[in-house]
Image (tube, rainbow, N blue to C red):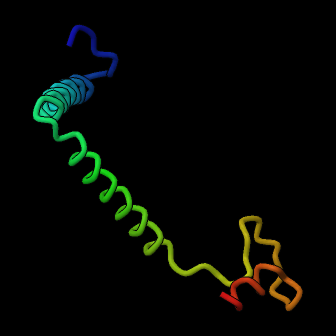
């Protein structure tokens, strides 16, 4: 809390909140380490990140068949992407 690099009263408030959050997260991590719950915490974190990835893919919507990242793929019978999608 020595220096606040953010401007104004809003910056002071944000700095105080971020310092408090950092202190609480540090305290929580020490408790997790002391109790030996690191594996459980890691498993919960992994499941949460997987769920966020699935949610991101669902919200992105369907991807057109035969398209690639550059967007210049034409859907024709000789296209290897189209053949792989049809066979799978």
In screen coordinates, is 30 left or right of 57? left
Looking at the rendered image, the quarter that the N terminus falls into is top left
Question: In the shown orientation, is residue 79 left or right of residue 65?
Answer: right
Q: Which of 65 and 3 is in front in this view?
A: 65
* Residue at 55 percent of width and 81 percent of height: 62
Residue 84 in the image: above or below residue 70:
below
In the picture, measured across the screen, residue 17 lies left or right of residue 58, that is: left
> How many numbered circles are shown?
0
Identify the residue at image location x=74%, y=81%.
66
Q: Quadrant of residue 56?
A: bottom left
Residue found at the far right of this picture:
78
Does the rendering let one see residue 9?
no
Q: On the image, which quarter does residue 87 sit in? A: bottom right
Seen in the picture, residue 21 relative to 46 is either above or below; the reply is above
The part of the image, by quadrant, that contains residue 53 is bottom left
Residue at the location (28% across, 15% down)? 4
User: In the image shown, does 35 or 54 lie closer to the viewer?
Assistant: 35
As displayed, is residue 72 above or below residue 47? below
Q: Where is residue 63 in the image (x, y as percent from the top left)?
A: 60, 79
Q: In this view, does 85 lie to the left or right of 42?
A: right
Say which quadrant the C terminus sits in: bottom right
Q: Where is residue 50? Give x, y as percent.
A: 38, 61
Q: Residue at x 32, y 21 (%)?
A: 7
């Amino acid at each position: 809390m020595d220096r606040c690099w953010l401007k104004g009263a809003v910056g002071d408030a944000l700095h105080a909140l971020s310092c408090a959050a950092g202190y609480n997260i540090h305290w929580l991590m020490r408790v997790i380490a002391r109790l030996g719950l690191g594996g459980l915490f890691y498993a919960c974190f992994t499941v949460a990140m997987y769920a966020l990835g699935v949610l991101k893919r669902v919200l992105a919507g369907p991807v057109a068949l035969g398209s690639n990242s550059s967007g210049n793929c034409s859907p024709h019978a000789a296209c290897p992407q189209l053949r792989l999608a049809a066979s799978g």
